[in-house]
Image (spheres, grey):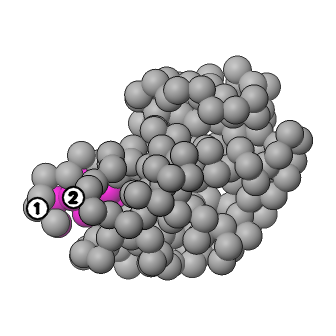
């Protein structure tokens, strides 16, 4: 779930001007430009999608032939005809499977997740919760991804980060780590891009 707009934030102002729901859209835009994530006709699953800025971006890139499904505990306001949203507890694999089944999706081309745990301000605690949450996401994503499909996750940096990357490399054919310019300067968030075998 993305944080609301903050005053005096250039990207937040830009997002408002361009009618995006959150500044986080520019993180996905940057990742997409670098890794060529979203193409027309794809099926995209966005986990922790509220308030919907990543879905807004995906909708434009997918065009009328592609589809995206956004999952979140919060209800997401309608976005476009090629976007479906479902209120769902992503920590429950059965709920995620039910959401995919509602669209008759057996698999997807791309899984996106900009989700973060509720932060405490204690960096190592927040990092640990981020790792735990992303472990749930990648375990589920592996079931849904097509061969050569991609998974993008936001992870807070910390003491267990490298061990987590090693775990991912045992499960995916390619794993890349990047920090996006659109992240706030003091942010410890990193993005991990994994490709299915």
Image point 11% across, 61% down: which residue?
122
User: Compared with residue 128, is residue 83 higher up or lower down, i.e. above or below?
Assistant: above
Across and down, in percent, residue 129 comes to 26, 53
How far is disc 1 from disc 2 in space, using C-alphas?
6 Å
Image point 53% across, 34% down: which residue?
71
Residue 125 visible within the image: yes
The boundaries of the magenta stretch are 124-132
Q: In the rendered structure, does residue 62 fall within the stretch colored magenta?
A: no
Disc marking residue 170: none
Between residue 30 and residue 179, name the one nearer to us. Answer: 30
Between residue 84 and residue 53, name the one nearer to us. Answer: 53
Q: Main secondary structure of the magenta part?
A: helix
Residue closest to the far front: 17
Quarter occupied by the N terminus: top left
Quarter occupied by the C terminus: bottom right
In the rendered structure, the answer to whether residue 113 lies left or right of residue 82 reads left
Dot 2 falls on a residue whose secondary structure is helix
Res 35 → quadrant: bottom right
Between residue 136 and residue 102, name the one nearer to us. Answer: 102
The answer to whether mark 1 and mark 2 are in CB contact below 8 A is yes
Residue identifier under label 1: 122
Label 1 Cα crowd, 10 Å radius (few <14 / some 14-19 / many 20+) = few
Across and down, in percent, residue 188 comes to 29, 72
User: Compared with residue 152, is residue 90 higher up or lower down, i.e. above or below?
Assistant: above
Dot 1 falls on a residue whose secondary structure is loop
User: Compared with residue 143, is residue 177 higher up or lower down, i.e. above or below?
Assistant: below
Across and down, in percent, residue 40 comes to 85, 52
Across and down, in percent, residue 187 comes to 29, 71
Image point 24% across, 75% down: which residue?
186
Disc marking residue 126: 2
């Amino acid at each position: 779930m993305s944080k609301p707009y903050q005053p005096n934030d250039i990207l937040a102002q830009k997002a408002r001007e361009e009618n995006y729901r959150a500044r986080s859209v520019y993180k996905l835009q940057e990742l997409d430009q670098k890794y060529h994530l979203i193409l027309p006709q794809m099926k995209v699953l966005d986990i922790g999608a509220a308030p919907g800025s990543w879905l807004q971006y995906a909708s434009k890139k997918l065009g009328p032939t592609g589809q995206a499904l956004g999952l979140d505990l919060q209800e997401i306001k309608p976005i476009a005809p090629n976007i479906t949203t479902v209120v769902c507890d992503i920590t429950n694999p059965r709920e995620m499977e039910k959401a995919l089944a509602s669209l008759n999706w057996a698999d997807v081309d791309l899984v996106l997740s900009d989700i973060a745990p509720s932060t405490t301000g204690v960096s190592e605690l927040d990092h640990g919760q981020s790792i735990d949450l992303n472990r749930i996401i990648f375990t589920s994503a592996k079931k849904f991804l097509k061969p050569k499909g991609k998974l993008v996750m936001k992870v807070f940096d910390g003491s267990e980060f490298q061990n987590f990357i090693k775990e991912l490399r045992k499960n995916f054919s390619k794993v890349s780590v990047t920090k996006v310019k659109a992240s706030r300067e003091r942010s410890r968030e990193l993005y991990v891009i994994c490709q299915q075998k």
